[in-house]
């Protein structure tokens, strides 16, 4: 058994709905529901004159006799017995400034009883766009790891008919370039002619090598040539994923692991940020 306590309270809010029922005396009992400053919904009885003016989405200030249980917790009240003695509608009976001041005071007072609920206001479009960009970018970065692995395996199959050999650098020339930063770094573009032998014949091909430290290259270079067309040749490096020599191969698992770890880390961070911004209120 609990005792009831009636307290007069003034609360502002946004009307969310109206309803009525017929009691045992065949009387219509009207009620209105509204969302308070703490985002909790409250339902109280009202007179017919106020009920007819209550429109979903409109804002108002309610003067309520709240019937509460036991210790007077505003979040545990009797909906049927609690009654709005008057309703002041914003824009008609009261102004917006008064309403906003009322809501600020209400939030402070209502927070004494329970932490305010999170609102369901829509996020701005620009924020959703940023969230989606991070989310999609993160997913693509994570997906790039298996894509890179399959790409290297495919490269290995693409050069399955190529034969490894060492080519001899018979001529080389270089040009220098710098970065456009305060501390300029020098880069060398080295144009090399490489001669190799295949099937008793000698062939020559030209390639460009970029080097940050040196303006010359070693006299012998790792390369591959097409078994069926020996004149088709490329500089090559052994690739640990492709398990053969291919152009731009990586001969160290460490370099791949570092690359994949960075891609996964950035991808996970971007995905997390995207989920938080897009879906978490």
Image: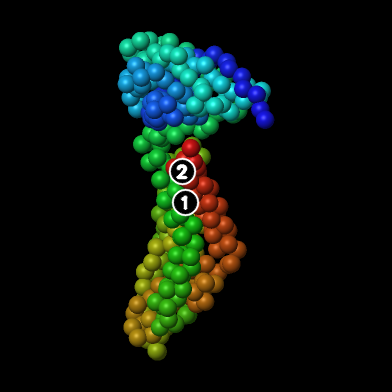
Q: Dot 2, crowdedness within 10 Å: few (<14), some or many (≥20)?
A: few
Q: Residue 46 carries which label?
A: none
Residue bearing mark 1? 138
Q: Position of residue 184 (x, y in %)?
A: 48, 42
Residue bearing mark 2? 279
Residue at 43% x, 62% y: name it: 209
Residue at 47% x, 80% y: name it: 164
Q: Tell which residue pokes out farthest to the bottom in this image.
A: 200
Q: Position of residue 64 (x, y in %)?
A: 49, 16
Q: Is 207 above or below relative to 104?
A: below
Residue at 38% x, 41% y: name it: 129
Q: Where is residue 278 in the image (x, y as percent from the top left)?
A: 44, 42
Q: Residue 195, can we see it?
A: no
For this view, does 20 lie left or right of residue 103? left
Q: Is 174 above or below relative to 113?
A: below
At numbered mark 2, what does the secondary structure look like: helix, strand or loop?
A: helix
Q: Tell which residue pokes out farthest to the front in this image.
A: 25
């Amino acid at each position: 058994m609990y005792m009831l306590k009636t307290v007069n309270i003034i609360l502002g809010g946004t009307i969310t709905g109206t309803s009525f029922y017929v009691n045992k005396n065949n009387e219509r009992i009207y009620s209105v529901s509204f969302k308070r400053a703490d985002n909790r919904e409250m339902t109280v009885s009202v007179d017919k004159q106020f009920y007819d003016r209550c429109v979903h989405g409109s804002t108002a200030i309610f003067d309520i006799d709240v019937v509460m249980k036991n210790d007077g917790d505003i979040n545990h009240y009797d909906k049927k017995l609690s009654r709005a003695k008057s309703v002041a509608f914003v824009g008609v009976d009261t102004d917006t400034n008064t309403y906003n001041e009322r809501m600020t005071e209400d939030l402070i007072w209502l927070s004494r009883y329970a932490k305010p609920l999170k609102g369901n206001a829509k996020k701005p479009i620009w924020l959703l766009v940023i969230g989606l960009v991070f989310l999609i970018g993160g997913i693509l970065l994570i997906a790039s790891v298996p894509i890179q692995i399959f790409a290297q395996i495919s490269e290995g199959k693409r050069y399955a008919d190529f034969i490894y050999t060492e080519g001899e650098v018979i001529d080389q020339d270089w040009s220098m370039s710098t970065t456009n930063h305060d501390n300029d770094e020098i880069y060398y573009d080295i144009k090399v002619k490489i001669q190799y032998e295949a099937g008793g014949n000698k062939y020559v091909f030209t390639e460009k090598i970029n080097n940050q430290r040196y303006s010359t290259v070693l006299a012998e270079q790792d390369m591959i040539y097409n078994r069926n067309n020996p004149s088709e040749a490329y500089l090559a490096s052994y690739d640990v994923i492709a398990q053969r020599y291919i152009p731009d191969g990586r001969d160290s698992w460490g370099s791949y692991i570092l690359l994949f770890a960075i891609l996964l880390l950035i991808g996970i961070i971007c995905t997390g940020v995207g989920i938080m911004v897009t879906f978490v209120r």
